[in-house]
Image (cartoon, rainbow, N blue to C red):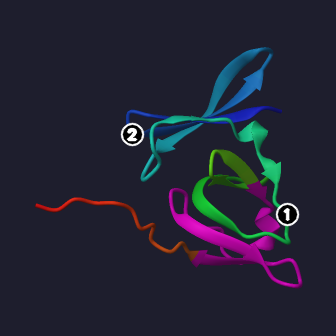
Amino acid sequence: MKQRLVVMNGQRIVQTEQGGAWKNEKVDKAGALKPGMYNLYMAQEADKTKSYDGQIVHADSSGVYQQFGKKFVMHSPMDFDIVPAIGSAKSINYDAQGKAQVSAMAAQRGRSRSR
């Protein structure tokens, strides 16, 4: 089943493809998510030997979806003690038992101008 997330006008819309048409499944507040279309069906299964830094864009019973660069990674919700909040920027890695270890991402340092 293909699933995508559409964020616009402050709303977060979860859609699934049924019979070649996209149907709305759930609508709620977008929070900190940027407007755009997030193709969740293109998410890769998380490799438990790697660390992933990025924003959590969606979570349901089938997975926790994190934007990792331009791509998406799907983590199993069973690997979390507490599923991270949607819209939060998190760093996720796995311990030796395969449990997800979640921490806040370090602030990105960028160029800025001051007057």
Q: Name the spot of residue 44 as percent of width and height, x first.
A: 81, 49
Q: Callout 2: few (<14), some (14-19), or many (20+) C-alpha neighbours within 10 Å? A: some
The kind of residue tagged 1 is: Asp
Q: Is residue 3 left or right of residue 89?
A: right
Q: In terms of secondary structure, where does tag 1 sit?
A: loop
Q: Name the spot of residue 19 as percent of width and height, x first.
A: 80, 15
As displayed, is residue 86 above or below residue 29? below
Q: Callout 1: few (<14), some (14-19), or many (20+) C-alpha neighbours within 10 Å? A: few
Q: Which residue is mark 2?
A: 10
Q: Name the spot of residue 78 as percent of width and height, x first.
A: 81, 68
Q: Mark 1 or mark 2, which is nearer the start of the sequence? A: 2
- Whether the magenta-drawn stretch holds residue 97 is answered as yes
Q: Which residue is mark 1?
A: 47
Name the residue furthest right: 97
In this view, the mark in front (2 or 1): 1
Task: Name the residue: 62% across, 51% down.
Answer: 69
Q: Quadrant of the C terminus?
A: bottom left
Q: Which residues are magenta?
A: 74-103
- Dividing the picture into quadrants, the one containing residue 54 is bottom right
Q: Name the spot of residue 52 as percent of width and height, x first.
A: 69, 65
Task: Name the residue: 45% across, 37% down.
Answer: 35
- Whether the magenta-drawn stretch holds residue 57 is answered as no
Task: Name the residue: 81% across, 62% down.
Answer: 76
Nearest the eye: 68 or 11:
68
As displayed, is residue 13 above or below residue 60? above
